[in-house]
Image (tube, rainbow, N blue to C red):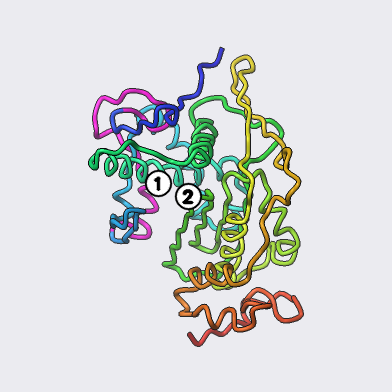
Amino acid sequence: MQEPLYQPFQRMRFESSVCFLSGDKLNSTEETLNVFAPWLISKYKLDERPFKLLDESMVSYADIKIPCSVKTAEAFEKLESTIENAFLKGYKAVSALDEQQLFLWVAKTVYGIIFKELQIAARQQQASGEQFHMSQGLIHKFSMLHSMLQAVIKPVKLDGFKPWSIWICEVDNAEEEFSYRDEINTLTFSLRMQDFGIILCLQDNGANKKYHEELWEKIGGVKLHPIQFEELCARVFYSAYLFNRLPEYHIMPVEDELHIEAMPLRGMQAKPVFDLWNNKTYGQVLENFWKRWNFLLLEIIKNPERPVSYLFNENEELIKAEEINLSK
């Protein structure tokens, strides 16, 4: 019989004395795992790059570490080696990766940041004499992500579904480019480096990929300019915000394995799975993703019916990356 999954959200305890994933007691505070892998830190000098946490404090990417047992760290080393090998080879190798391995690697990164944020929030609330509180929706999301991530160390199987939406694009990046984003409320992630970009919604059961199906049919397999990839990111991050379902799952022991089964997204609700798209709100998201090109919201939504796009022209035809000439 498979032992049950470790559930830290039941008691809302995120101590540095136990492994973040297995719950095993640690022998030392030195037993940690880098959320951003040492090979990434070295290649892009991430020990010199600032990372802003939700409490507005600044750390470096290299400073973000989480408590992790030696056994769990060894399991992650195997996964990390596979990811490193593909990422350093580039787009074709990344595209050939097993989707679940990529999901687990991204889940480790995003959950690692969530864990660090929760530790800080818990300390702040305890220091002010308050009890640590978080919305039930976020507890549900984070708890399920943690359960799925335990597939790195336990026989956890997904029964006939993928909890993710993944986009992998070839991108004409500068050699030193490293652009990372996450939105922990919607569990959305993007990364741009080497000659590729990745966007991943960690817990939508493929809904966002379906939502952007027509768009992806036009751009999938086409090399993008960085501003085009960032536009795609803005569209996905915004649709993830519009996604109005909280996916439900059943965890069932079957012999020596733990099986996770997804419940239908529609459930008993008649309303659409996504709220209505609003171009002004989307423009605000796009402005954020286009900061390096100094676009302002007023420029982006000069025509409220058609925000500025570098992906498609007025005839909804794909703009070729080599045709883009940015004076900004």
Compared to residue 234, the image places residue 168 above or below, namely: above
Quadrant of the image occupied by residue 50: bottom left
Foreground: 38 or 308?
A: 308
Residue 136, x across and y down, in percent: 50, 38
Nearer the observer: mark 1 or 2; the answer is 2
Query: Which residue was labeled with disc 1?
Result: 113
- Helix, strand or loop at label 1? It is helix
Quadrant of the image occupied by residue 268: top right
Residue 33 falls inside the magenta stretch: yes
Compared to residue 207, the image places residue 297 above or below, namely: below
Is 5 left, or right, of 243 in this rendering? left
| Magenta extent | 18-47
Is 160 left, or right, of 47 in this rendering? right
Residue 35, x across and y down, in percent: 38, 45
Q: Amino acid at mark 1?
A: Ile
Quadrant of the image occupied by residue 178: bottom left
Give the mark nearest the N terminus, 1 or 2.
Answer: 1
Which residue is at 53% across, 67% downward? 285
Query: Which residue was labeled with disc 2?
Result: 184
Foreground: 8 or 84?
A: 8
Residue 224 falls inside the magenta stretch: no
Foreground: 32 or 203?
A: 203
Which residue is at 63% across, 25% downward? 259
Q: State how far apart marks 1 and 2 are (Cα).
A: 8 Å
- Helix, strand or loop at label 2? It is loop
- Residues at discs 1 and 2 in contact (Cβ within 8 Å): yes
Q: Amino acid at mark 2?
A: Ile
